[in-house]
Image: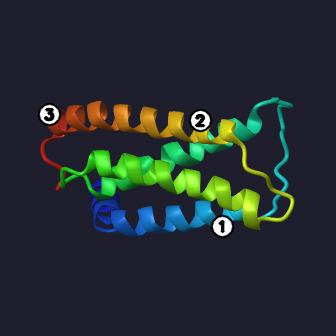
Amino acid sequence: MLEHIKNLLERNATIIAILSTIIIAVLSLKTISIENPLEITFFDKILHFSAYFFLTTTWLFSQRLKNNSLYIIIAVFLYGVLLEFCQGWFAPNRTKDYADIVANSVGILISALLFKYIYKYLIKRFGNTN
């Protein structure tokens, strides 16, 4: 069963990455109200970090057999900056926030670092995953 799920994810990794990219764009440009269940003052930054951590991880996984990690990191960063500026220009009741760009960047960098080491470990432990 797990092998079936693994194969399904590997075959559809690029589709998952593309869908993640689209979903983040829609959520970034749509006016939404998300409840802050724990009354955390920087809850918005946690959401930005999580979204860009996930987005970077999906793109890195989908392109894992190619050597373009740096391009992915740069592209996801520029995508986040573009969406942040689009929020300020086009999204009603949304503003651009440079702290959001920082949160995005931290999510991207941590994802890239973890992916590099965890993926190497998984290949050593379980063999090549292509």
Q: Nearer the viewer, residue 46 or 79?
A: 79
Mark 1 crowd level (few <14, some 14–19, many ≥20, 10 Å Cα)? few
Picture quadrant of residue 50 = top right
Amino acid carrying label 2: it is: Val
The disc placed on residue 102 is 2
Callout in the foreground (2, 1): 2
Question: Residue 108 location, x and y as percent?
Answer: 46, 40
Q: Tag 2's secondary structure?
A: helix
Which residue is found at the position 31% from the left and 58% from the top?
62
Which residue is found at the position 29% from the left and 61% from the top?
10
Callout in the foreground (1, 3): 1
The disc placed on residue 124 is 3
Q: Which residue is mark 1?
A: 26
Question: Residue 55 location, x and y as percent?
Answer: 48, 52
Mark 3 crowd level (few <14, some 14–19, many ≥20, 10 Å Cα)? few
| In this picture, residue 101 sits left or right of residue 11 | right
Q: Earlier in the sequence, mark 2 or mark 1?
A: 1
Question: Residue 126 location, x and y as percent?
Answer: 17, 39
Colour scheme used in the picture?
rainbow
Does residue 66 appear in this view?
yes
The disc placed on residue 6 is none
Amino acid carrying label 1: it is: Val
Q: Earlier in the sequence, mark 1 or mark 3?
A: 1
Given contact means CB atoms under 8 Å apart, are the residues at marks 1 and 3 in contact?
A: no
| Vertical order, 107 against 6 (above or below) | above
| Vertical order, 9 against 15 (above or below) | above
Question: Residue 20 location, x and y as percent?
Answer: 51, 61
Picture quadrant of residue 37 = top right
Q: Earlier in the sequence, mark 3 or mark 2?
A: 2
Q: Tag 3's secondary structure?
A: helix
Quadrant location, the N terminus? bottom left
